[in-house]
Image (cartoon, grey):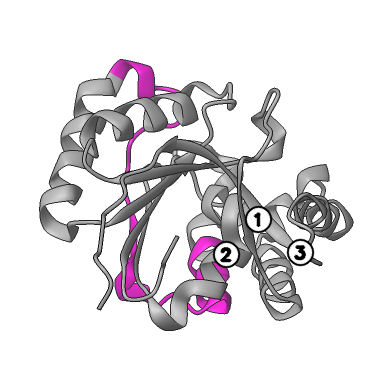
Amino acid sequence: MNFYGKRILFVGAHPDDIELGCGAFLHHILPTSEVLCVTLSDNQKNPNLRNVVEEHLASFAILGVPEKSVIIEQFETRKFPDMRQEVLEYLLKLRKDFKPDMVFVHTKSDIHQDHNVVTEEALRAYRGSTVLGFDVVRSSYGFFPHFLVEVSEADVQAKLAALAEYKTYLDKYYFDPALLRATMVRHGALAERPYAEGFDILRIVAEYSPPG
């Protein structure tokens, strides 16, 4: 799997999803890939989450994602099943505008209703693209990665620093640096590497390139 020079789209339902699911991987590929990070809900209907958009942008900045490569939309949290067609049409517009070679979305093992809709509609919208699923531990059920990407200590540190920007979620167990690191160690062990991030294989589209 070659990420060099590819256009790679990351789609998460809520602020923090992309960083939790694949922040180290995102940091790892940024120097050589064109990325677009799209969060479909800004969570601003919840008065306790007023700061998460600012925290989200700060998190991406630490990972090295330029602000021009970040989109935050206003689909209402926990209402995605009622807006399934609108989500699909939005993802189709992204396909037309960005033309991704590869798409990262939530794992199919995720039981959050919003996450589930994003994945199902992404599989419809990006039929001709490789689609891989990242895990958000708080809402996963039976996730096991079959696609593993080695990441470095620097990538791990960047992910931890990025998620530390979410002061809103400091008391959440799934933001615990020890848990985040342990997950990357476990995935690394599966790949016989020090660290890795793991993904579902939802669709692989391969190209044959003859030698020379």
Q: Is residue 100 above or below residue 109?
A: below
Q: Which residue is mark 1?
A: 197
Q: Which residue is mark 3?
A: 195
Left or right: where does residue 23 sit relative to residue 170?
Answer: left
Q: Secondary structure at mark 3?
A: loop
**Is there a contact, CB below 8 Å, between mark 3 and mark 1?**
yes
Q: Nearer the viewer, residue 73 or 168?
A: 73
Indicate the position of residue 42 as horizontal and vertical percent values.
Answer: 42, 47
Label 2 crowding class (10 Å Cα cut-off): few <14, some 14-19, many 20+?
many
Amino acid found under the numbered disc labelled 1? Glu
**Is there a contact, CB below 8 Å, between mark 3 and mark 2?**
no
Q: How many marks?
A: 3
Residue 69 lies in the magenta-colored region: yes
Amino acid found under the numbered disc labelled 2? Phe
Please give the name of the residue rendered at 85% of the width and 51% of the height, measured from the top-left corner. Answer: 179
Amino acid found under the numbered disc labelled 3? Tyr
Residue 198 lies in the magenta-colored region: no
Q: Which of marks 2 and 3 precedes in the sequence?
A: 2
Q: Secondary structure at mark 2?
A: helix
